[in-house]
Image (spheres, rainbow, N blue to C red):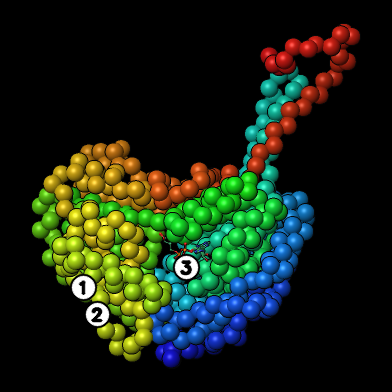
Amino acid sequence: GLSTTARSKAEQLSSDWKGTSATGGKTKNFIAGDFVESQATEWHDVLDPSTQTLLSRVPETTSAEFDQAVGAASQAYKTWSRTSVLTRQRFAIELQHQIRKHADSLASSIVLEQGKTFADAHGDVLRGQQVVESAIGITSNLLGDKIEVSKDMDTEVRRLPLGVCASISPFNFPAMIPLWSIPMATVTGNTLILKPSERDPGAAMIIAELCERAGLPPGVVNIVHGTVPTVNAICDNPSIKAISFVGGDRAGKYIYERGTQNGKRVQANLGAKNHAVIMPDANKNLALNSILGAAFGAAGQRCMAISVAVLVGTAQSWLPELAERAKALKVNGGFEKGADLGPLISPAAKQRVTGLISSVEEEGGKILLDGRNVVVPGYPNGNFIGPTIVEAVTTMKCYKEEIFGPVLVVLTADTLDDALDIINANKYGNGTAIFTQSGATARKFEHEVNVGQIGINVPIPVPLPMFSWSGNKASVLGDLGFYGKSGINFYTQNKTITSLWRAEDATGNRASVDMPTHH
Ligand code: NAD
C-alpha cells in the first residue's frame, strides 16, 4: 500500500478534484465543460510506480464519446475563434494564477502516478506554467504585417486559428506537455482535444479544472482518454485540423504518417540519445554534477536526459569519481525526504531497462555502477533501478537504443573531433552539451555539432518558451515547434488581404488583361 504521506495526498486529490482519482476510482473524460464518466468497456489501470497500488482506472473512450468531444470543440470554435485576443490573453493570465495556486496538487498527482520526486514534479509544473506565461504575450506576438504595397493598395497578413486541434502526450511530463498545447492552441483561437498518457492522466484532469476556474468556456478544451483507438480517431476525424504529438518514435511516426495522409498539420517530438562531452579543461565539479543530475534526474525518463557521456582525453581519469558521486544519489519514493530519483513508470519499463543493462555484459562492455538490484526500504514493489554507469562502445545495443532509464553510457574519445564524429553519426538530434572552459572549443562545438539544442556548460539546454523546441534529425517530424514564435505559427494559418481604396474614379473604359503587378 501507499505510504502515509502518499495516502493522504491521494485522498486529498480525490476529494479536491472532479476529474481524477488517486484512491482507485475512475478518471473522467472532460467534454463540453463536464467531467463525465465514460461508458467504456475497456479500462486501463493507473498504478503507483513505487508500490503498484491502484490509483485510478482510465477509460478507452467510446467512439460516441469521442464524437461528442469533437462536436463540443467544433461548436465552441465558432465563438472562441471570434473572441477578442484580449479575452484569450485574460484566460492565460487567469490560468497562470490557478496553476501557481494549485502547483502542489499538480505535483502530488505527478508523484503518485508518474513516480518522480516532489521537487522534480514541481519543475514539471513550472516548466508548463512558463509556457502559459509566454502565451500571455499573445497580444503582441500575434501582431500581423501590413504595408501599402502600391498607391492606395494595402496588403495585410492576418494570422487566424486552424479550428479543432488535438494533442497526444507522453507519460514523462504529465503537466508540462499538456501545458505546451493548451495555452498555445487556445490563445491563438483554436479549440483542443487532449489525449493525455493513459499511464498518468491525473495532472491533465486537474489542469482541465483549472481552465474551467480560469473562465475558459465549455468545449474549448476537452480531454478524452484512451490508447490506439482514440489516437486513430484523432488521426482520422476530418474536423481535427492539426495534431501535436510528443512521445516515442513508433507512435510518433505512425501518427505523423496517418495524420498528414489525412491532410492534417502534424508536429511530433520523438526519442533521443543526448550526449555530453567533457573536455579535459572543464570545470570538474560543474561537469560531473551537471551530468549526473541530467542523467539520473526523473530516473532518466526525460527526453533531454543526458544518456551518453563522452570523456575526452585526460577527462577519462574522472570516471571513478563520476561513479562515486552517482552512487551517493538516493533512490526512494517520490514523497520521501532527500529522494533524488524515484521508480520507472512500469514493471515493463524496469524489465526493458534491466535487459539493456545486462546486454552490456553480454556484448563485452563493463558495468561500472550497477543499479539493477537496488533495494529501497519500505518500497519492495517499486519499479526502481539505481543509478547505473556502463562503459561501452557505439556498436552496442545500450548505445544504439534509447534506454529511458537511469543509465549513463560512457564513451571515450581522444579529441573533440572524435567526439563530434560520434554525436553526428547518431540518428537522434534532440540535445547535447559540452563542458569546457575554452570559448574556442565551445564555438567549434556549436558550429560543428548537428544537434538542435546545445548546452555550453549547461546540461539540459531546453530553451525557455520565448524560444521554441528545436530538436532535429530523428528526434522530430514536422517543421514547426511547440511554443514561442514557432508554436504560434503551428497553431495559425495566414490570410493575406489585398485591398484598394482610391478617392478618384477609375479612368478609361477598356479592361487590361495583363498580369497585375501593382508596380
Ligand atoms: P509513447 O510513444 O509510448 O506514448 C505517447 C503517446 O502515444 C501516449 O499518449 C500513448 O497513448 C500514445 N501511443 C503509444 N503507443 C501508441 C501506438 N502504437 N499507436 C498510437 N498511439 C500510441 O511514449 P511514452 O512512453 O509515453 O513517452 C516516452 C517517450 O517520449 C520517449 O521516447 C521520449 O524520448 C519521448 N519524449 C520526447 C520528448 C521530446 O520533446 N522530444 C518529450 C518527452 C518525451
Whether pointer 1 and pointer 2 mark residues with C-beta atoms closer than 8 Å, the reply is yes
Structural crowding at the residue carrying mark 1, measured as other residues with C-alpha within 10 Å and reported as few (<14), some (14–19) or many (≥20): many
- Residue 160 seen by the camera: yes
Q: Is residue 181 left or right of residue 304?
A: right
Task: Classify the position of the N terminus by image quarter.
Answer: bottom left
Closer to the chain start, of discs 3 and 2, is: 3
Q: Which mark is residue 373?
A: 2
The residue positioned 45% from the left and 74% from the top of the image is 114
Where does the image place residue 125, in percent across and percent down from the top left? 49, 67
Q: Nearer the viewer, residue 247 or 158?
A: 247
Q: CA distance from mark 3 to mark 2?
A: 24 Å
User: x, y (%) of residue 388?
Assistant: 24, 69
Mark 3 packing: few (<14 Cα in 10 Å), some, or many (20+)? many
The label on residue 370 is 1
SS type, badge 3: loop
Does ligand 1 reach within 8 Å of label 3's beta carbon?
A: yes
| Residue 374 falls in image quadrant | bottom left
Inter-mark Cα distance, 1 to 2: 8 Å
Where residue 511 appears, as percent x and y from the top left, is: 84, 11
Residue shown at 76% from the left, 50% from the top: 82
Residue denoted by label 3: 171
- Which residue is more in the foreground, 95 or 195? 195
Percent across and percent down for residue 30 are 67, 71
Residue type, mark 1 in image: Asp
* Quadrant for the C terminus in the image: top right
Question: What is the three-letter code of the residue carrying label 3?
Answer: Phe
Q: Is the distance from the Cβ of mark 2 to the nearest ligand 1 atom less than 8 Å?
A: no
Mark sitting on residue 97? none
Vertical comparison of 322 with 490: above or below: below
Q: Earlier in the sequence, mark 3 or mark 1?
A: 3
